[in-house]
């Protein structure tokens, strides 16, 4: 079953407003403040005043992130689709939810998700807190409702206790969304070989990766979209990956035909382990992705002007892929703090 993206956008906003009712507390210093150890070159992460990070909030969020009771049949958790060893993504073509129902979009990575100005593939959700509600209520993901999930979990003494300790209120939608968002904000990736090279370790990348880096930044203009510390400018655009788009992308929100096929540019961090690629997982390898771009895309009417053909040799493609592999962060993929 496929529902329009506007459904999830409106749902998120309604539930966010509900959970931000006038009885929502302002941030207090209760709990042990948590300071994210940001890698060199990373900007300060924006964090809402009503959801400042504490160890206790993060621990509650981790517990919820791995709790399958958030799904109707208690078979699927957030972590079912966002696997640490897969860069907080998975390797399915598109997401798989309860009853083995197959979604229509590839699961995006959650690495550095706290920096994103908007969420979901078409950028249709405004905050991490609001985003939490979408998968729970999706009939092809968790197949539940947020209210039912809250009613189920608030009967558990540990959740009620942790809610009072972390947010000074009973377990409810506010606590659910803020806690999971708190955990997601600590998912920071910035310790790949490329990062080590950037910090002065000239041996951190292979010669092939260094050649590929030159191609990425100077020859093929990949960084016109995949730029900055997170290798994305977060734009929503049509990258020419398809001749026709069954999923309208941003058009689902704007209703503007000029927005058909527009999706958010994702980070390239850990891209080696997050395939398959594109919004629908239709590209099985990085080689296939590079072939699409070197061919100049599909030529779709809405295709971004930066997608233009370029010549690339077999050796250059291998070097470019080697550089992309140098964005794989072993510290992130093995971080025990992200695990259950």
Image (cartoon, rainbow, N blue to C red):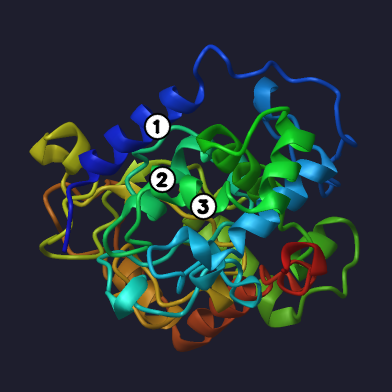
In which quarter of the view is residue 253 placed? top left
Question: Residue 196's image quarter?
Answer: bottom right
Q: Secondary structure at mark 1?
A: helix
Instruction: Reply above or below: 50 against 219.
Output: above
Rendered image: mark on residue 146: 2
Image-based side of 79 in relation to 99, left or right: right
State the image coordinates of residue 111 (x, y, percent, origin top left).
62, 57
Taking the view exactly as shown, the residue that stands out farthest to the bottom is 314
The residue to which callout 3 is attached is 226
Mark 3 secondary-structure assignment: loop
Q: Position of residue 125 (x, y in %)?
A: 39, 37
Q: Closer to the N terminus: mark 3 or mark 1?
A: 1
Q: Are marks 1 and 2 in contact (CB under 8 Å)?
A: yes
- Give the quadrant of the C terminus: bottom right
**Residue closest to the eye, 326 or 16:** 16
Residue at 27 percent of width and 46 percent of height: 305
The residue that label 1 is drawn on is 15
Local packing at callout 1 (Cα closer than 10 Å; few below 14, some 14-19, many 20+) is: many
In the image, is residue 26 above or below residue 95?
above
């Amino acid at each position: 079953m496929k529902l329009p993206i506007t459904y999830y956008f409106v749902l998120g906003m309604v539930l966010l407003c509900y959970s931000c009712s006038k009885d929502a507390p302002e941030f207090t210093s209760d709990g042990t403040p948590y300071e994210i150890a940001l890698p060199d070159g990373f900007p300060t992460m924006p964090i809402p005043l009503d959801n400042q990070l504490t160890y206790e909030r993060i621990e509650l969020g981790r517990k919820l992130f791995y709790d399958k009771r958030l799904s109707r049949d208690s078979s699927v958790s957030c972590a079912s689709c966002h696997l640490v060893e897969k860069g907080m993504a998975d390797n399915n073509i598109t997401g798989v939810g309860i009853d083995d129902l197959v979604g229509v979009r590839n699961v995006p990575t959650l690495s550095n998700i706290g920096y994103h100005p908007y969420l979901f593939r078409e950028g249709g959700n405004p905050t991490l807190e609001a985003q939490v509600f979408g998968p729970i209520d999706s009939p092809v993901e968790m197949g539940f409702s947020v209210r039912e999930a809250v009613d189920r979990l608030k009967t558990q003494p540990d959740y009620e206790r942790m809610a009072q300790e972390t947010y000074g209120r009973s377990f409810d939608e506010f606590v659910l969304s803020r806690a999971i968002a708190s955990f997601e904000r600590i998912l920071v990736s910035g310790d790949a070989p490329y990062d080590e090279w950037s910090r002065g370790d000239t041996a951190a990348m292979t010669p092939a990766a260094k050649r590929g880096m030159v191609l990425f930044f100077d020859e093929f203009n990949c960084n016109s979209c995949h730029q900055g510390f997170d290798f994305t400018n977060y734009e929503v655009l049509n990258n020419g990956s398809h001749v026709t788009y069954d999923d309208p992308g941003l058009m689902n929100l704007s209703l503007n035909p000029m927005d058909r096929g527009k999706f958010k540019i994702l980070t390239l961090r850990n891209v080696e382990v997050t395939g398959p690629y594109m919004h629908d997982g239709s590209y099985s390898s990085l080689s296939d992705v590079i072939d699409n771009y070197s061919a100049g895309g599909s030529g779709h009417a809405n295709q971004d002007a930066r997608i233009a053909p370029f010549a690339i040799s077999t050796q250059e493609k291998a070097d470019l892929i080697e550089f992309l592999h140098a964005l794989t962060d072993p510290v992130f993929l093995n971080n025990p703090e992200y695990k259950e």
